[in-house]
Amino acid sequence: MTEINITESLDRIVAAACYHPFYRDQFKGVARFEDCPVLEKRVLYQQVQVAMRDPAFRQGTYFSPTGGTTTGSSFYFPTAIAENKRQRHLLAKRLAASGIVQPTSVVLNMFPCTRLVRSLEIFSEYCELCGATVLPVGAHETNEEVWSVARQFGATLLAGMPSRLIAFARWLQTTGQCLPTGSLPTEGGLTIEKVLIAGELLHPPKRQMLERAFGVHCFSGVYGSAEMGVAAYQADLCAPPVYRFPLEILYVEIVEADGEGFGKLVATNLVRTHHPLVRYDTGDVGRVVNRTADEVWVELRGRGGDSFAIGGGYWHLADFAGVLSRFAEWQIVIEFDEEAGMDRIRFHVVTDDSPAESLQRELTVAIRAILEADDQTHLTDVAFVPAVALRRHPATLKVPSILDLRKGGRQT
């Protein structure tokens, strides 16, 4: 790949942003990229909503929804259609060159498509740009129909969010269906070669379950957001995930890094000038692990908001990794218990088999020890639940790791 002139690209984006209604107030008097302030989501969308009142500003625009699972309400970020198409072409070349999607791939696309959430359409286009065959079944089709389409057309690649793929995997296990590996489709089965994920991190327990259900060990991933678009990829996902960011698409910075190099992932889109994205705080946490002439490799640790406060303490999901890592699916639900007059935190855990009471006691003791729970400031419960009991976002079917139902709480 040709080395990218980052300085020239950044100067071009900043010049466009200084006259843009999203940034005019924040970038007043700014001439250099390094002097641009880091932009938070709240501030960006205040400007976006004002600008969108002008009908001329909405012409030829692709809207991407964001929020809902993190803010409780949806916002919509605009992108010029032509620039959106150009970014997809650039990333599609990387997906094809890395072997993630090939002309021989028959892709069962299980991404969602509802209320302007168009992941299904996005990934169908990527497959087409790579010369592959795509089966756009979506996230809301029944498992029976998904299985029927996959068998009829001989799917070789499963694409979707981990939450939806897990649901499909559980259905396969419950109904006794199988997806054997091999070089040709087998009678009554399929040859699944790869899994492509996006939208959520693929934690090791989830991956292990999908490996067992699909008989696949090759997992790929792409990374993006409503504001950035799809901007990074990885042909062979590891744990923790490391994504490759092409410098022709996105310039990434790690801000406020800790001793291990982890900090806020701040992004500047180098393709879009009609509606620029400059030094945007993505809300994700990561660190740079490698640089090449045309890519930056970033290890992602999760969302900056993967935390909660209860009982006067502040906790991060990483605090519970040792306890919850054996389970593919779980959810933390926090709400105010009016009868008890205090907050209650419930750890909802999904297991494949009927759990023993001893396991529930073991988990309860371990979690209460982490939280230093004494039932004086808040109540703590652990419950084994079926997968259908986990609350999902209605549009994306994501399972928020933390569901804070208290007034003013956030969903992560």
Image (cartoon, grey):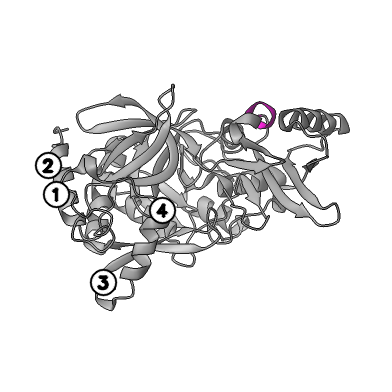
* Magenta span: chief secondary structure: helix
136 versus 367 height, above or below: below
Mark in front: 4 vs 1 = 4
Disc 3 crowd, CA 10 A, few/some/many (<14, 14-19, 20+): few
Q: Is residue 289 visible?
A: yes
> Do the CB atoms of the residues marked 1 and 2 lie less than 8 Å apart?
yes
> Do the CB atoms of the residues marked 3 and 1 lie less than 8 Å apart?
no
Q: Is residue 171 left or right of residue 260?
A: right
Mark in front: 3 vs 4 = 4
Number of the label disc, if any, that sits on residue 203: none
Amino acid bearing label 4: Lys
Q: Is residue 257 left or right of residue 79?
A: right
What's the magenta region? Answer: 321-325
Residue on which disc 1 sits: 12
User: At 28% from the left edge and 54% from the top edge, which residue is drawn?
Assistant: 26
User: At 75% from the left edge and 44% from the top edge, which residue is drawn?
Assistant: 346
Residue at mark 3 to residue at mark 4: CA–CA distance: 20 Å
Q: Secondary structure at mark 4?
A: helix
Amino acid bearing label 1: Arg
Q: Is residue 272 left or right of residue 297?
A: left
Q: Secondary structure at mark 2?
A: helix
Sequence-wise first label, 3 or 2? 2
> Do the CB atoms of the residues marked 3 and 2 lie less than 8 Å apart?
no
Amino acid bearing label 3: Phe
Residue on which disc 3 sits: 57
395 versus 185 height, above or below: below
Sequence-wise first label, 4 or 2? 2
Residue on which disc 2 sits: 8
306 versus 71 height, above or below: above
Residue on which disc 4 sits: 41
